[in-house]
Image (spheres, rainbow, N blue to C red):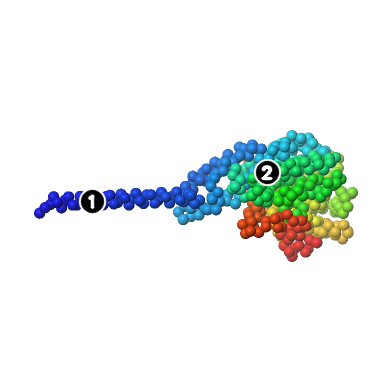
Amino acid sequence: MEKPIVNGSHCHNQLWFIIRASFVFCLVLLCLDYSVLSGVKNGVFPLVSQSFSGSQKTHNATQLAAIDEISVPNPISNDAHRDFPFRENNYNVTDPCSGKYIYVHRLPARFNNGVLRDCRNLIKWFNMCPSLMNSGFGPKVVKPQGVLSRKNWFETNQFMLELIFHQRIKQYKCLTNDSSMASAVYVPFYAGLDVGRYLWGYNTSVRDSAAYGVADWLRKQHEWNRMFGQDHFFVAGRIAWDFRRQTNNESEWGSKLMNLPEFMNITMLSIESSSWSNEFAIPYPTYFHPLRNINVVHWQKRTRTRKRRYLFCFAGAPRPTMKGSIRGEIINQCLSAPNRTCKFLDCKAEGNKCDTPVEVIKVFRDCNFCLQPPGDSYTRRSTFDSIISGCIPVFFHPYSAYAQYIWYFPKNYTKYSVYIPQNDIENGNVSINRVLSRFSEHRISEMRKEVVKLIPKVIYANPKSRFERFEDAIDIALKKVTERVNKVGEVMKEGKDPSVDFAVGNQWKLKLAGIVGDQALETLF
């Protein structure tokens, strides 16, 4: 029996087993390590929570950025991040900002903040300096008189959209400093406030100076070369007609901004669009700028349950020198209607109350229907004042709303509004009182519910707000702009020319068909 030899062999076998096991274990570790590294390399990030945490810190930091120094560190610098989803435990958790990133150009101050220094002359007849207060909302309403809720109401000027939008975009959760990640590029040019200074008594070279300056600056930026501006957008606080001058004739109105080659490649968001396909209308600023969801909910309930004394009302002034205006006839019909049928707020009377939030809302809250005829242009700020008051708008021209706010209003326009053809009023064929009297109480109630649903969509929330339940006018605009730009990008990837249909004139009927449908379109003309 040679037990010592047997024991030595057994120890020798154990030693080799340990060596082999250690080698296999090290090999497995190396493979695992390489798989992690290769996963990151290919855009798959195992540490999902860490990636999102960094992104969240970035978004919080943007809230403190100055209006002319919007600075947001890129949450994830790897461009592949947009093309590959996060993966963990077989669940796909995509980047919530994928396809939504926006880059903000750092324009020279003379094109935005510099314009505001001339606030006394922004509009010829008014001192606009108070309107710049509170992020462009203007002075707070200090005496709501039981008509308005106690907070969130301001004396907002209808031309302040550019400043309001610029302030709010600082809160946008998907800003990036890496323009290569951006779906859309925002150009913070205060085009309306700039040209508003020069519309009366200035030659065309002065009116066009800033337009040419911005176009020249944009061409020199490397972001321009990616899509030659078709991923760019800007906001104008005046109607599109103010930027569509065709010639250099001194007597012709406005600037030629939107006829410059560069701006034919840019999307414009304005309070009223024209028939061009690169223009989109977004709501006029109203007086209501809530801070929280609950403020909206309370106001909606208040407007929905309000008992109304008048069948219809009109707030405005006649346009006696304007060819084809029906305002005079509308005022006559209102004043001649039976008692407590129509309420008229005269905007031309001494001590004009039409720029006072309490007075306007006081009238609209007491009416079932609010008349919205064209004024100096097709659209009116009054349309949105009536909506936030729960008053059903009555339109007389399809370009006053249906072809304009295609991102905001329901396709079935009969759900929330009434349409009376302007020609019928001109020819004296229609009694407004008779038309509106045909609506039953039940039908009016149903229409008001639809109008009240629109309130969150047409307001501009306080820049400090964090709506969770609602999307306001800016949320919707940014969503639609990025969708539009992403579609242009898809066209380019397919090897097609993205300029086709990007900026095309005479598109009124196409815009109308997009919101009311082809069948309903026939009833509007």
Instruction: Write the residue at 78% across / 35% down.
Output: 120
In this picture, residue 328 sits left or right of residue 33: right
- How far is the residue under mark 1 from the one under mark 2? 73 Å
Which residue has dot 1 on it? 14
Residue 370, x across and y down, in percent? 78, 52
Q: Is residue 124 above or below residue 334?
A: above
Residue 495, x across and y down, in percent? 63, 58
Q: Amino acid at mark 1?
A: Gln
Name the quadrant containing residue 209. Answer: top right
Instruction: Write the residue at 68% across / 53% down.
Output: 453
Check the picture and name the quadrant holding the N terminus: bottom left
Which residue has dot 2 on it? 220
Q: Amino acid at mark 2?
A: Lys
Tag in front: 1 or 2: 2
* Nearer to the camera, 497 or 379: 497
Q: Estimate how packed mark 2 is, as few (under 14), some (14 to 19) or many (20 or more) residues with alpha carbons within 10 Å.
A: few
Mark 1 lies on a secondary structure that is helix
* Nearer to the camera, 360 or 368: 360
Mark 2 lies on a secondary structure that is loop
Residue 472, x across and y down, in percent? 66, 48
Check the picture and name the quadrant holding the C terminus: bottom right
What residue occupies the far left of the structure in this picture? Answer: 1
Name the quadrant containing residue 164. Answer: top right
* Count of marks overlaid on the render: 2
Instruction: Write the residue at 74% across / 41% down.
Output: 213
Q: Estimate how packed mark 1 is, as few (under 14), some (14 to 19) or many (20 or more) residues with alpha carbons within 10 Å.
A: few
* Nearer to the camera, 78 or 173: 78
